[in-house]
Amino acid sequence: MNTISSAPSASQPPLAFRRSSLAYKPGLARNRWNLAFTGLATVFSIIAVLPLVLVLAYVLIRGGSLISLQLLTSLPPAPGLDGGGIGNAILGTLVVTLIASLIAIPVGVGGGIYLAEYSSSGPFAQFVRFGTNVLSGVPSIICGVFVYGLIVATRLFFDQSYSAMAGGIALSVLMLPTVIKTTDEALKLVPNELRWGAIGIGASRFVTIVRVTLPAAVSPIATGVVLAIARAAGETAPLIFTALFSPFWPEGVFNPIATMSVLIYNFAIMPYEAQIALAWAASFVLVVMILAANLFARWLGRFAQA
Amino acid sequence: MPSATAASQSQSVCLSLENVGISYGSTEAVRGVYMEIPHGQVTAFIGPSGCGKSTVLRALNRMNDLIEGCTLRGRVLFDGQDLYARDVDPVEVRRRIGMVFQKPNPFPKSIYENIAFGARINGYRGDMDELVERSLRKAAIWDETKDKLKESGYALSGGQQQRLCIARAIAIEPEVILMDEPCSALDPISTLKIEEMMHELKKSYTIVIVTHNMQQAVRVSDMTGFFNVTANAEGDGKVGCLEEFAPTEQIFNAPNQQATLDYVSGRFG
Amino acid sequence: MSTAPASDPFVLRRRPLQERLVDQGFQRLTVVLASLVGIVLLGILLTVAMGSREAMATFGLGFLTTSDWDPSGERYGAFTAIYGTIVTSVLSLLIAVPLGVGTAIFITENLIPLRIRLVLGVMVELLAAIPSVVLGLWAIFVMEPFLRPILGGLYTTLGWLPIFSTEPQGPGMAPAILILVVMILPIITAISRDSLQQVPPELRSAAYGVGTTRWDAILQVILPAAVSGITGGVMLALGRAMGETMAVTMIIGNSTNFSWSLLAPGNTISSMLANQFGEADGQQVSALMYAALVLMLLTLVVNVLAQWVVRRLSLKYS
């Protein structure tokens, strides 16, 4: 059998590497570096998780201790007075988030369907995808400025300036990119065989999407939508000068409305103990709601994989 | 063809497996392996898929440590030292027992750096250019790469990448080279080149190779271990075991076990 | 959905008009909905640009380099806020990147048992879910009081440096930077973790196969292979840090007076918007819109750059 001509002869040159026993030698430079880096990564991870533990601890202890039925159902007190609650803010957060969802979910799912089902990576689809990425990077305060300029300053709705509607629209702009991306990605994961199967038996494109493709992707879409809603519920910046705030119960969607996030912002910088306590209580309610939504989304996601 | 005399039993033992069993979590992959792999020869592991031959191969240089929940029972001795003893440094083990993987896996670095990287972290202080050239020559890929040492290792074809990986393994001058189906992803011509190279390499190294290809085992190996899958004692699953370990010629011409005969003659499952 | 009549199923005929209309209508509807993204984006840009026309005409590019912010005297310059935006975001990034990448390595490499790693990963993700305004509240009442003696120590020992040259008196740039670190850490950790997990396992075995220690493999093989994703994540985090509003507004002090010192109260563009936009009128609105335009362009550049970097680097390493 031929051997390779270019190979050197079998006689080995002397070993260029120091050979030592197989035993682990802790004094070796490489082992000391290894230990040092492991220690460093451990310290970094602890530092990264510490704020979560501290924030949660403070919110749960300081906010949780204040929670009562009365607090959850009554209006905030006038400055300088004690007692009161955050009932209007809880209701307001639900209203504004609901408005945002009602706008962002149909638009986002529709846009996602276009990207995944109708566009074949044409220039328009490329532009929409690029735009989605850009939009998701637009600072949330800018969404507020946008809606202020578009709706509040122009008194677009029944000559009303600040309104729950304006706040909801601002939040929907924030939610939109997440919903589009989630839908697009979820639909792309649906195997093409499923689509061909439906089209092959004579179903129209519309029926295929609505009856076959969309149901197959519903769980990952739902996961993304729940996460987007949770994120929107905690947003403050787009609401400060769109939904504004109100010390009263909500008076329809075309009037200013209180929300928990704006309540926390307004009350945290007030010099009154009662208001600061309400800010902690609102933080507790908000964080519990958002964490619950996140855990729900996680559960939905697991459901999707099964 | 390797000669039968090469497989003589008088050779000294390089790796010795004593009642080795390996599990992934609670699933037993292989059990009861006794084996003495001789110095300076090519030992082939053959057998149907799922018989644990790759698992055993990876146990020989503690690559299984990287797999979560993988545990080993029994002992693996390398020149008489237990590789799984408490004070053994797996990094040192892998420097002495190199490995070539099923899929060519060069680093995303230049061809030169692919070779130099391992040498450097192993504390090589000599002439790096010379080491790179010598390693590439031994792996029979020098002529194809000498003009593009600065190019990415990914720029090579699959067969060239695999020879680069062999060069990378021999650059750190291990005593043993483990090869896990090194040709399964390659075309016949690349396979032939690597087989020719192995004849040359075994003058300097002990080689253990897992192969799906029985002809390849016949062509390159001196000793052959036939692994088989059997129902485990509990009857609730399958487990690999070493059916027969003997000189290659004996395994393929006159095996002691009926199962071996069935497998090598193609009358299997 | 069969449309053939029951009497003769083999006759091929056109689908009913209604079905075709629904089919086409639905497709058009999705096109319209998809283009809303572009319309909204354009709308944002137009609103902000139109709003800032007046200030642009009055102050020109000098707006970017002067630091007067005087609503009564109608003189506006955004340098303080631009300086604050860039300094807080870049410094928070410098702190958060090693922490985030280190944590990602800790979560992906098998340094500790899988169970603990999963819990750690979930905790970091939950940190990302905590609203900014809640972090701001925490920063005001917990972090800043705790930090003040430490920052005071910086002032007494390193006060000769311009960046530590003022006595910390509560809110300021330094606490804002630290709360930004808390806010962008989850993004950097999550994206770094995803990038590290996508490094092919073969590469890992290759590194260990030539006898690397764990950290040789991580630092010299695995991390370089994941660098495109990590860089993209870092850029996204930079964009997020620049636009982050609530927590920063609550803790930075909202001072329009310029100071080099990190211990002094400062301002960012977004905190200035949050703080003043509601009560502004006249030229101040236009000046704020101008600042918003600057912020938007800054984040736009960072985000587009992020996408470009990811595409470029991932070409190199795949």
Image (cartoon, rainbow, N blue to C red):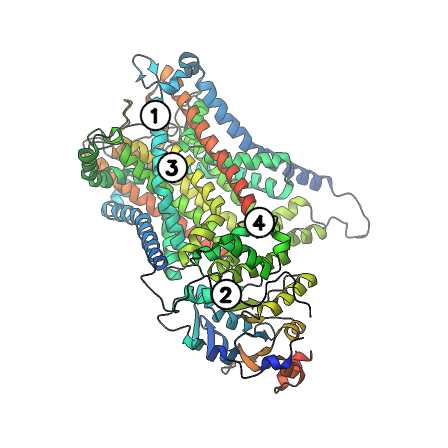
Q: Circle 1 is placed at which residue position?
A: C81
Query: Spatial distance from mark 1 to mark 4, Cα to Cα?
Result: 51 Å
CA gap between label 1 and label 3 equals 22 Å
Identity, as a three-letter code, of the amino acid under mark 3? Glu
**x and y, in percent, of residue A224 in the image:** 48, 46
Q: Alpha-carbon neighbours of circle 2 within 10 Å: few (<14), some, or many (≥20)? A: many
> Which residue is at 59% across, 51% downward?
B154
- Report if residue A82 is visible in the image: no
Residue at 38% x, 57% y: name it. C117
Residue C289 location in percent, x, y? 41, 21
- Residue picked out by circle 3: A235
Q: Nearer the viewer, mark 1 or mark 3?
A: 1
Which chain does the numbered disc 1 sit on? C
Discs 1/4, front: 4
User: Residue at left 52%, top 42%?
Assistant: C313
**x, y percentage for residue C295?**
42, 27
Tag 4, which chain? Answer: B
Q: Earlier in the sequence, mark 4 or mark 2?
A: 2
Amino acid at dot 4: Leu
Q: Are marks 4 and 2 in contact (CB under 8 Å)?
A: no
Circles 3 and 4: CB distance less than 8 Å?
Answer: no
Kind of residue indicated by mark 2? Gly
Q: CA distance from mark 1 to mark 2?
A: 58 Å
> What residue is disc 4 on?
B149
The disc placed on residue B98 is: 2
Q: CA distance from mark 4 to mark 2?
A: 23 Å
Q: CA distance from mark 3 to mark 4?
A: 54 Å
Label 2 resides on the chain identified as: B
